């Protein structure tokens, strides 16, 4: 786990992929490896929301969520497109807390949105934890229609370029 300080905001880069189960009441026991990384945030609680791009959920620390919402709140609410975005982005957002045994309750509507059955994957993606139905996660990361090498080049190929004038 790494901490980066940017403008007095600590950004936590979480590490790991964890397979676990959700019980019939929608409770998820945080795996010990993730719990250790989130120890400082356990008392603050978390924000759980629908993913914008995938059929999964996103678990944000409160500090990460506040940082995201600082940017969202800069949008002009008198522009319809912005207002529609904010409404859709925050749809289904819930504050959740870990109980004394480090379980988080996933609300039924979010379980339905993500198509979660019993087996889960918690995937640390930078400073957010994605919560996936295991089968959906495996189908997504093993999608052969996506050429990861090409995707990596498109997304990251322009980073760390040496300036040709140096």
Image (spheres, grey):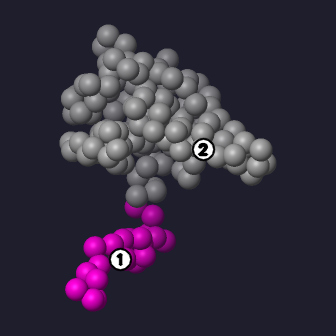
> Quick check: marks 2 and 1 in contact, CB under 8 Å?
no
At x 62% / y 36%, what residue is drawn?
A: 90
Question: Mark 1 falls on what kind of element?
Answer: loop
Question: Mark 2 falls on what kind of element?
Answer: loop
Q: In the picture provided, is 70 more to the left or to the right than 149?
A: right
Quarter occupied by the N terminus: top left
* Span colored in magenta: 142-166
Q: Position of residue 144 (x, y in %)?
A: 44, 69
Above or below, comparing residue 23 to residue 121 in the picture? above
**Residue at the outermost bottom position:** 165
| Residue 27 seen in the figure | no
Q: Nearer the viewer, residue 43 or 124?
A: 43
Q: In the picture provided, is 80 more to the left or to the right than 113?
A: right
Q: Nearer the viewer, mark 2 or mark 1?
A: 2
Q: Residue tagged by mark 2? A: 74
Q: Residue tagged by mark 1? A: 157
Above or below, comparing residue 137 to residue 20 in the picture? below
- Circle 1 residues within 10 Å: few <14, some 14–19, many ≥20: few
Quarter occupied by the C terminus: bottom left
Magenta segment: does it hold 106? no
Q: Considering the whole magenta stretch, tell me its main secondary structure.
A: loop
Q: Position of residue 29 (x, y in %)?
A: 34, 23
Q: In the picture provided, is 40 more to the left or to the right than 150?
A: left
Above or below, comparing residue 68 to residue 47 in the picture? below
Q: Position of residue 54 (x, y in %)?
A: 54, 50
At x 26% / y 25%, what residue is drawn?
A: 40
Q: Quadrant of residue 119?
A: top left
At x 41% / y 70%, what residue is drawn?
A: 155
- Circle 2 residues within 10 Å: few <14, some 14–19, many ≥20: few
Q: Quadrant of residue 98?
A: top left
Q: CA distance from mark 2 to mark 1?
A: 30 Å
**Residue at the outermost top position:** 100
């Amino acid at each position: 786990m790494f901490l980066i300080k940017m403008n007095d905001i600590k950004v936590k880069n979480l590490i790991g992929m964890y397979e676990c189960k959700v019980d019939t009441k929608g409770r998820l026991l945080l795996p010990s490896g993730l719990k250790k990384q989130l120890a400082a945030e356990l008392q603050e609680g978390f924000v759980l929301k629908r993913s914008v791009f995938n059929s999964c959920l996103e678990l944000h620390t409160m500090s990460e969520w506040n940082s995201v919402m600082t940017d969202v709140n800069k949008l002009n609410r008198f522009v319809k497109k912005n207002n529609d975005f904010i409404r859709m982005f925050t749809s289904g957002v819930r504050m959740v807390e870990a109980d004394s045994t480090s379980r988080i309750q996933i609300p039924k509507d979010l379980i339905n949105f993500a198509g979660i059955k019993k087996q889960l994957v918690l995937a640390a993606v930078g400073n957010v934890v994605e919560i996936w139905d295991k089968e959906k996660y495996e189908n997504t990361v093993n999608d052969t229609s996506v050429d990861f090498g090409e995707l990596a080049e498109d997304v990251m190929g322009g980073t760390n370029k040496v300036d040709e004038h140096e």
